[in-house]
């Protein structure tokens, strides 16, 4: 990475982490994905149950294979092949009381708010309450100036790209643009803005000095 970019990352992230702390959130920085994976693995105790929520960021860095290899750890994984529709929902329900939930955040504002949009709601629900610990792995591409830019980023970029990734039949997968559809496969049903948390440090945001996910 360009050295000026690296310095900028570190300066901006330091400020965001300070702002997280004022909100009862926790943050840390890894300059690259490899270090992020190692540091997340260190946060998972033996015997923990870990709920996997939809996230290209964590998938793309090979995190889940490594978590599954920790002795005694149970991965609650609705993405495992062969689940029926009912089993998939039950797996997501079970994840709501896991020890740890891991995903990303669709956007992080400079003042330390976490902005997300879900189709089914299990990911944003688990972020807010349920699992004892939440770990969010977030690349620099998801840092935005403010709430308006967070919403714009999610609605006009992250949602259409994720609809393409999942293979949904929505207007945005045809031309890349949101048509505020009302289709069965709409992935834009539940917005959340996490301003803070009373359970200090329950949410840990691992910021990564690379672009990850969408
Ligand atoms: S509302 Fe529909 S068209 Fe718009 S981004 Fe979401 S899924 Fe795509």
Image: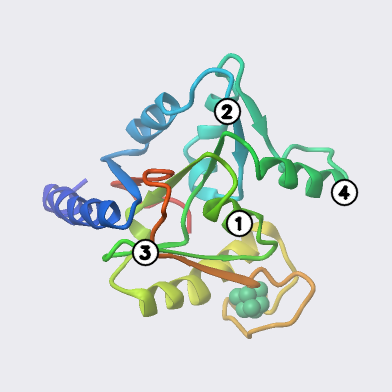
Q: Residue at x 57, y 28 (%)?
A: 65
Task: Sort mark 4 into few (<14), some (14-19) or many (20+) by Cα contacts within 10 Å.
Answer: few
Residue 105 falls left or right of residue 109: right
Q: Which of the two discs, 3 and 4, labels the residue nearer the N terminus?
A: 4
Q: Which of the two discs, 1 and 2, labels the residue nearer the N terminus?
A: 2
Residue at mark 3 to residue at mark 4: CA–CA distance: 33 Å
- Name the residue carrying label 4: 86
Q: Secondary structure at mark 4?
A: helix
- Name the residue carrying label 3: 113
**Where residue 108 sits in the image (x, y, percent)?**
37, 62
**Where residue 137 sits in the image (x, y, percent)?**
42, 45
Q: Which of the two discs, 1 and 4, labels the residue nearer the N terminus?
A: 4
Q: Residue at x 44, y 78 (%)?
A: 152
User: Which image quadrant for residue 33?
Assistant: top left
Report the image quarter containing ligand 1: bottom right
Q: Nearer the viewer, mark 4 or mark 2?
A: 4
Q: Nearer the viewer, mark 1 or mark 4?
A: 1
Q: Nearer the viewer, mark 3 or mark 4?
A: 3
- Name the residue carrying label 1: 125
Residue 93 falls left or right of residue 64: right
Is 69 above or below relative to 107?
Answer: above
- Name the residue carrying label 2: 65
Contact? badges 3 and 4 (CB < 8 Å): no
């Amino acid at each position: 990475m360009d050295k000026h970019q690296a310095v900028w990352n570190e300066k901006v992230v330091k400020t965001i982490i300070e702002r997280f702390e004022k909100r009862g959130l926790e943050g840390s920085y890894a300059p690259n994905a490899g270090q992020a994976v190692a540091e997340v693995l260190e946060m998972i105790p033996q015997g923990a149950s870990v709920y996997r929520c939809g996230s290209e960021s964590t998938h793309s860095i090979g995190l889940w294979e490594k978590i599954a290899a920790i002795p005694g750890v149970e991965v609650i994984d609705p993405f495992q092949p062969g689940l029926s529709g009912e089993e998939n929902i039950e797996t997501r329900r079970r994840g709501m009381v896991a020890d740890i939930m891991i995903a990303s955040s669709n956007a992080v504002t400079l003042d330390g708010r976490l902005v997300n949009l879900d189709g089914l709601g299990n990911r944003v629900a688990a972020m807010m309450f349920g699992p004892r610990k939440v770990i969010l792995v977030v690349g620099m591409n998801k840092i935005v100036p403010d709430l308006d830019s967070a919403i714009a980023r999610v609605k006009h970029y992250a949602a259409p790209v994720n609809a393409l990734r999942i293979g949904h039949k929505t207007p945005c997968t045809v031309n890349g643009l949101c048509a505020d559809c009302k289709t069965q496969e709409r992935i834009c049903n539940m917005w959340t803005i996490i301003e803070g948390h009373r359970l200090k440090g329950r949410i840990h945001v691992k910021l990564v000095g690379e672009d990850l996910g969408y």
